[in-house]
Image (spheres, helix red, strand yellow):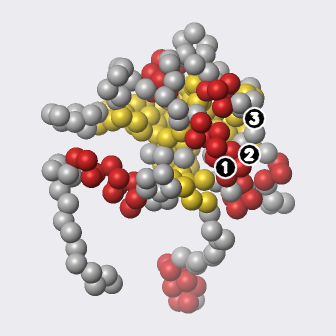
Amino acid sequence: MSGGKFRFIDPDQQDGFRRGIFNAIIAPRPIGWISTLDPDGNANLAPFSYFGLFSSSPPIIGFSCNTPEDRHAKDTLANARESGEFVYNMATRSLVEKVNATSTPLAAGTDEFEFAGLEKAPSVKVRPPRVAATPASFECVVDRIVRLGDREGGLATHVTFGRVVGMHIDEDYLDRDGRFLTQKADPVARLGGLQYAVSAPPFDLPRQFRRAREESY
């Protein structure tokens, strides 16, 4: 139990403080490295730390992004809305510099794969390419896009939910039982500010309800 003095923060009154503290506390956050295609067939690739897995059956993942002040929507959102497709690519420690490069604000239609020096690999069920160097990619079709936060003086956020229709997994990252070797892949997560993190050595922790059920027999 914390014994410190607590500070109360009203998000509606602390506009400049809000983003930083949210990002530092809701952490680590997995990175959704999302590739899309624009209507002209130009590839786009961008990282999103507001990203997560929402269901395994059906398999649903999602990412969110604010409406930028300089255009109607971020390229990833606009492309996903127009095409109904996107690809998630795992952001790993070995690729983190290239992940960071793809966050650079570039003109619409610029190919971030080329900008970051990344090789494309073809998808099977969707049109957007995937990152060839990553150990795991998910092909997704858009299930729905939800607009949130329409309040006076605030920016809207769009959460894009996608149903996974195909997975590409490097066999070197699967054990004999077909389980994915997360620690070997070394995925990168976001913390607050400019900080990133990688997975610490994993540990097992039995679920309490299972232990209680076993002890009752």
**On the image, which quarter does residue 46 sit in?**
top right
Per the image, the residue denoted by label 3 is 132
* 9 to the left or right of 212: left
Q: Does the residue at mark 2 contact the one at mark 3 (Cβ under 8 Å)? A: no
Label 2 to label 3: alpha-carbon separation: 8 Å
Crowd class of label 2 (few under 14; some 14 to 19; many from 20; radius 10 Å)? many
Q: Is residue 78 visible?
A: yes
Q: What residue type is disc 1 on?
A: Thr
Q: Nearer the viewer, mark 2 or mark 1?
A: 1
Q: Residue at x 50, y 56 (%)?
A: 195
Q: Does the residue at mark 2 contact the one at mark 1 (Cβ under 8 Å)? A: yes
Q: Secondary structure under badge 1?
A: loop
Per the image, the residue denoted by label 2 is 135
- Disc assigned to residue 8: none
Residue 49 percent across, percent down from the top left? 48, 46
Nearer to me, 73 or 18 = 18
- Disc assigned to residue 92: 1
Whether 74 is drawn above or below 210: the answer is above
Residue 124 percent across, percent down from the top left? 72, 27
**Placement of the N terminus among the 4 image quadrants:** bottom left
